[in-house]
Image (tube, rainbow, N blue to C red):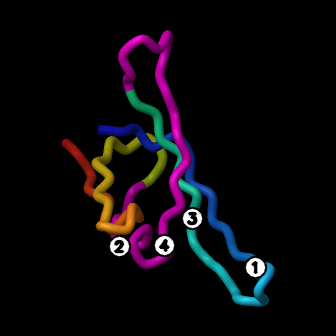
Amino acid sequence: MYEVIGIQHRKYTNKQGRDVEGYNLFVAYDEKDVSGRACLREWVATDVMEDSGVSVGDMVDLNYNRYGRICSIKPVG
């Protein structure tokens, strides 16, 4: 379970000239042997993020597909 601590919309053109749009999702979580909380950043596709309806402060579970990409975000509680 993760706490959403930040959401950043990103839209840019990559080196191959392709338009890329999505979100950086910043989350915090409890980790053994860490003073305080650990955090990470994950890239989330626009459709997945918009379907989730999550906002900063929400507790969520992240679900990954077989390619290691986030395929859904489920609010918890």
Residue 58 drawn in magenta: no
Residue type at the position of mark 4: Ala
- Name the residue beneath numbered marker 2: 51
- Name the residue beneath numbered marker 3: 23
Label 3 close to label 4 by CB (< 8 Å): yes
Q: Name the front one of labels 4 and 1.
A: 1
- For marks 4 and 2, the one nearer the N-term is 4
Is disc 2 placed on a helix, strand or loop? Answer: helix
Q: How far apart are marks 4 and 2 (CA)?
A: 10 Å
Residue 14, position in %: x, y?
75, 79
Is 37 situated left or right of 11 in this image? left
Q: Name the front one of labels 4 and 2.
A: 4
Q: Residue 14 carries which label?
A: 1
What residue range appears in magenta? 30-54
Is disc 3 placed on a helix, strand or loop? Answer: strand
- Name the residue beneath numbered marker 4: 45
Residue shown at the point (43%, 67%) measured from the top left: 49
Residues 11 and 64: in front is 64
Is disc 1 placed on a helix, strand or loop? Answer: loop
Q: Name the front one of labels 2 and 3.
A: 3
Q: How far apart are marks 4 and 1 (CA)?
A: 15 Å
Residues 69 and 24: in front is 69
Is 28 situated left or right of 71 in this image? right
